[in-house]
Amino acid sequence: MKPLFYGFFALIMLQSCSTKKQILYVQDVGKNENLTYAFSESIIQPNDILNITVGALVPETAIPYNKLRTGGGNNSNSIETMKLNGYLVSQELTISFPQLGDISVAQKTVSQLENYLKNKLITDGHLNAPTVTVRHLNSKFTILGDVNSPGTINFTEKKLTLLQAIGLAGDLTLQGRRDNILIIREVDLKREVTHIDLTKSDWLQTEWNYIRPNDVIIVNPNNPKVKSAGFIGNLGTLLSVFSIILSTTLLILSL
């Protein structure tokens, strides 16, 4: 009876194990380490909140071209306070800019908007040699499934990689499936979906290496966890298995 029970227990344990090949990231990274990919920024969208800072050789001359900061105190540089002082992109893809009026941001990236404002300040005779810095303040992505800290995460970086996004979520659990990460992305009112195999490195040279605002990342459980959940979680199945084992054992002992 004991050997049979131990064999059954060992079978359950094997079903819940993950192999080294299923857990390690970018296992073939050495093969593709010399390949490159040109990063392309995302287009500014309605309801984006932008932080725009204008500078000049004489700082005082740039003051009229910057929003008056509100909400002072120790938290004056917090993201939430910066959002209140930011430029909200309208549904018509415009922002209201000091001294310049309404500015169209349609089909512009952050870098393109920086260059546009800089050139406009110069050509319209506002400032000499100005500097313009633009940053997104409300970029976010959502990560769900077998990660240690699922949820919606804000970021302000121009470039955020998929691996960095996973790091912000506390990494995948050991039961998270690394060979089939699902990414859902909406671009120009169209939905794009892709599957990423983190155990390989070929995706590092694609556009999916970088996170876009409002991306959704889904990490499904691996097969051992699914099998374990389905086997242990179904009490009827578990009782049936034990019943078969018990009947078979009694039959053997009666012979």
Image (cartoon, helix red, strand yellow):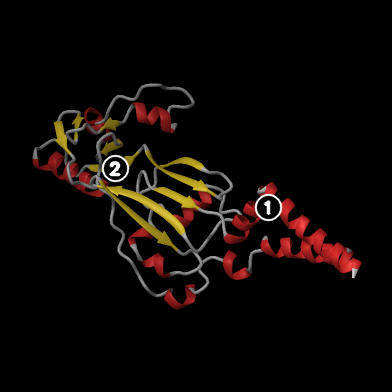
Quadrant the N terminus occupies: bottom right
SS at badge 1: helix
In terms of secondary structure, where does tag 2 sit?
strand
Q: Position of residue 140 (x, y in %)?
A: 40, 41
Residue furthest toward the right?
254
Q: Which mark is residue 229?
A: none
Q: CA distance from mark 1 to mark 2?
A: 61 Å
Which class describes the residues within 10 Å of circle 1: few (<14), some (14-19), or many (20+)? few
The residue nearer to you, when weighing 59 against 7, is 7
Query: From the viewer's perspective, is the residue at label 1 or at label 2 nearer?
Result: 1
Q: Is residue 174 visible?
A: no
Give the quadrant of residue 21: bottom right
Q: Residue 141 appears at what percent x and percent y?
A: 41, 44
Q: Please, what is the three-letter code of the amino acid marked with disc 2?
A: Thr
Q: Quadrant of the C terminus?
A: bottom right
Q: Which of the two residues, 204 or 83, is positioned nearer the viewer here?
A: 204
Q: Residue at x 9, y 42 (%)?
A: 123
Q: Decide if residue 110 is on the left or right side of residue 16.
A: left
Taking the image as shown, residue 198 lies to the left or right of residue 67, namely right
Residue displayed at 24% across by 48% down: 109
